[in-house]
Image (tube, helix red, strand yellow):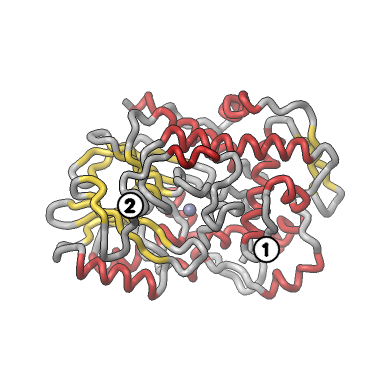
Amino acid sequence: MATEAATDIEVSDVETKDHRVSSGDKRVSDLNYPHGEKVPTSTEVIEVAKGVLWARIPLPWSLDHINVYLFDEGDGWSVIDTGARGKTGIEAWQEIEEEVLAGKPIKRVIATHMHPDHLGLAGWLVERFKAEFWITQTEYLLAQTLWHSAAAEFPESELDYLFRGGVDRKYEPMIRAAGYGNYKRGVYTLPPTYTRMEDGNLIELGGRTWRVVIGRGHSPEHACLACLDEPLFIGGDQILPEITSNVSVYAREPKGNPLAHWLSSLDRMRAVEGDPLVLPSHGRVFFGLQKRIDALINGHLEKLKKLHAWCEQPKSAVKTFKALYRRKIEGMDFYLALGEAIAHLHLLESLNLLERHFDGEVYTFASVGEVEMASIVDDVNKLPGIELRSLSDFA
Ligand SMILES: [Zn+2]
């Protein structure tokens, strides 16, 4: 159901759920896929670097897979991400255990972030192998919060968020009936302890040293890993090759500015050196990190520009869908689309390019000033609390 629980389906881009190239993203074909069209399964894995195996765990959703990566640690394995709770994922891991692990245990489970497709089976793997669990603090605590906040009653704060966004009140019975808090359905009991990864930390993984590089906006403290010994970069959902990750304002933080965090943290990743092989959570491994960062940022800048023009007459969030999405928004996509529309509105508002009005029921936004696309990222970086420490500071 709505809002934060919507993260349990990792439909990354409301516009391109079917994996078509998104608007503002014409350069996808510039990316270089070293394995061509070939993708792994849970048993036919692909070695992408020495001792680094790319496997896939099926997902029972429209985005039908997640990539997981296994790192040979000599006497065992480290794994990045797990798939969602449920029979499909467990069977895939049983196959991996039989055919890939060569009798060695999984010693460490690393989750890039808290979405169910990434850590849904972390607890199960940790229990089965007595493995360690590594994740950032915010992701761990948010996962615990969502897991424990399933409620019989649909919270009024969630309804307020929807109505203030322009959702028609006639849908209230339907929304209430759908229930609240299904994060837990996608996530096995979380590991009771964790090891914290923090921005800039160095970690050892698969016989190499990696820098933790935090991304924000899609989830609050998403860990990417940049290898210092070899051109490899674990992108998680921060940098996907063919789809763009959902960036949403959630009812829990209705004044949030996640798109500012997203653009700023992506911009910071331009400082990752060289042309590493990017290991993303969905799609195929690829070369072209910098091009992809440009395309992801430009896609949002174009949407911001369109949105600003569209709001010449005041609009509610729901009334901006036409400007932002090319296809009809239906079903679950509605919540992702609403969250993402509000994220774009809040970013423009934070730069004083939109004015918000409240009539007691619905927020509307009206454009002011001119959008200078070339300066938006710099302006965002100047907002308080947005910019993270420069990557070059860690070197
Ligand atoms: Zn995600």
Looking at the picture, how far across and down is residue 26, in whole percent? 54, 39
Name the residue: 15% across, 63% down.
102
Res. 191 in view? no
Res. 69 in view? yes
> Is the CB of mark 1 within 8 Å of ligand 1?
no
Measured in 3D between alpha carbons, the distance from the residue under mark 1 to the one under mark 2, in whole angstroms, is 36 Å
Which of 61/171 is in front? 61
Residue 134, numbered label? 2
- Judged from the image, the secondary structure of the residue bearing numbered disc 2 is strand
Name the residue: 52% across, 62% down.
9
Q: Quadrant of the N terminus?
A: bottom right
Residue under numbered circle 1: 330
- Mark 1 belongs to which amino acid? Glu
User: In the rendered image, which quarter is residue 227 located in?
Assistant: top left
Residue 305, numbered label? none
Q: Nearer the viewer, mark 1 or mark 2?
A: 1
Q: Quadrant of the C terminus?
A: top left
Q: Are marks 1 and 2 in contact (CB under 8 Å)?
A: no
- Judged from the image, the secondary structure of the residue bearing numbered disc 1 is loop
Looking at the picture, how far across and down is residue 264, in whole percent? 53, 33
- Mark 2 belongs to which amino acid? Trp
Image height of 299 relative to 192, above or below? above
Name the residue: 58% across, 58% down.
4
Looking at the picture, how far across and down is residue 214, in whole percent? 42, 40
Is the residue marked by circle 1 packed among few (<14), some (14-19), or many (20+) residues within 10 Å?
few
Image height of 41 relative to 280, above or below? below
State left or right for residue 200 relative to residue 107: right
State left or right for residue 101 relative to residue 342: left
